[in-house]
Amino acid sequence: MRTGMRAAMAAWIFCIGIWLAGVAAHAQSMPKDVAARVELYPIPSLTISDRQFLNGDADGKPVTVAGELRIAQGTGRLPVVVLMHGSSGVGASIEPWVHHFNAMGISTFVIDGFSGRGLTVVGPNQALLGRLNLILDIYRSLDILAKHPRVDPERIVLMGFSRGGQAALYASLDRFNRLWNKSGVQFAGYIPFYPDCSTHYLTDTEVAVRPIRIFHGTPDDYNPVTSCKAYVARLKDAHRDVVLTEYPDSQHAFDSGLLGVSSVVVSANAQTARHCHLTEGEGGVLMNADTQAPFTYKDACIELNPHVGGNPATAEQARKAVTEFLQALFKLG
């Protein structure tokens, strides 16, 4: 009986060895841009107004948003890029970035700040969610990532697009980190794509001592690059590490060119603050600097029907620039 048991055990171990070898061979044959593991996370957050955000007032509506962590192939603690979507939610244009980063050996964490709030798009009605609320979701995501055993907490970068680019840009503010970032870590860098830079917040040149790399298009009439140039100039005067890369022939969402999109279309009925000048007033009230009245999306400066469209050539240039930036920042071989 004991001999039979030993034989059965040996056969079982042999079979397990063959199975493990097959798994290893399969892993080696997987495309590099395929994640080794995918994990979905509930992110406890709040829905609050911009005034509450600016005042550090957490008396908001509790909400659970979601995040998808794709762990790149590799071992140990890996770098991560957190991706924050724009006014249309998590769309197809994020996928090329995710696969590209995974192929580099960088994990990705895609935040969905809309579905848990019952939202799909906010472009035609930006008042549905405060301009700063996505920053809170971002910081809450950092809570999760900072504790994950496969994440290097010193190598987490934030990247965002349009409304998410605005969040990625202003998430760098020291003041906002003090108010809302309870993770104990900071992002290693910030990569905003075509953000809205039209708001002047108090102490907004006091940003984290981390690199900020902004990518924008000259003809963008959704979030004009002009306001970003002015903000970058103020940041440089404050001796901050910031670079604005501007593409003269690229509209809003030009990186959709990574999907082969090359057409430019009107984003029907989407609201744009392209001619608004906003400033933080007393008590955290966002003011229309031109009217000296509290800002609303019914102000005369709000217009409709901006353009969006991809540019495959500049999309590839931007991807190359981002790649080189991350390779240097993360010290990738």
Image (cartoon, grey):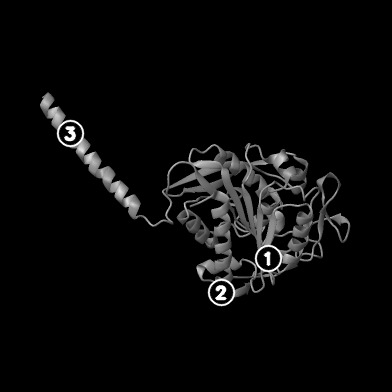
Of residues 328 and 2, the one nearer the viewer is: 328
Q: Residue at x 84, y 44 (%)?
A: 283
Asked if labels 2 and 3 touch by Cβ distance under 8 angstroms, the answer is no
- Which numbered disc flags the more N-terminal residue, 2 or 1? 2
Quadrant of the image containing the N terminus: top left
Counting residues from the start of the chain, the first of labels 3 and 2 encountered is 3
Q: Which residue is mark 1?
A: 270
- Mark 2 and mark 1 in contact? Answer it, CB < 8 Å: no
* Residue bearing the label numbered 3: 10
Q: Depth check: 130 or 232 in front? A: 232
Query: Is 106 situated left or right of 217 in this image?
Result: left
Disc 2 marks which residue? 262
Q: What's the CA distance linking mark 2 and mark 1?
A: 20 Å
Pair 3/1: label in front? 3
Nearer to us in this view, 240 or 202 = 240
Amino acid type of the residue tagged 1 in the rendering: Ala
Query: In the image, is 85 to the left or to the right of 34?
Result: right
In the rendered image, the vertical position of residue 293 relative to residue 179, given as above or below: below
Q: Position of residue 189 (x, y in %)?
A: 63, 50
Report the side of 333 relative to 86 (left or right). left
How many numbered marks does the figure carry?
A: 3
* Distance (Cα) linking label 3 and label 1: 67 Å
Q: Are marks 3 and 1 in contact (CB under 8 Å)?
A: no
| Farthest residue, direction top | 2
Q: Mark 3 against mark 2, which lies toward the viewer? A: 3
Q: Position of residue 85 (x, y in %)?
A: 60, 56
**Residue 161 position within the rendered picture, expressed as x and y whole percent measured from the top left:** 62, 59
Image quadrant in which you'd find residue 21: top left
Instruction: Residue type at mark 2: give it.
Output: Ser
Instruction: Give the residue type that dot 3 points to.
Output: Ala
Res 262 visible: yes
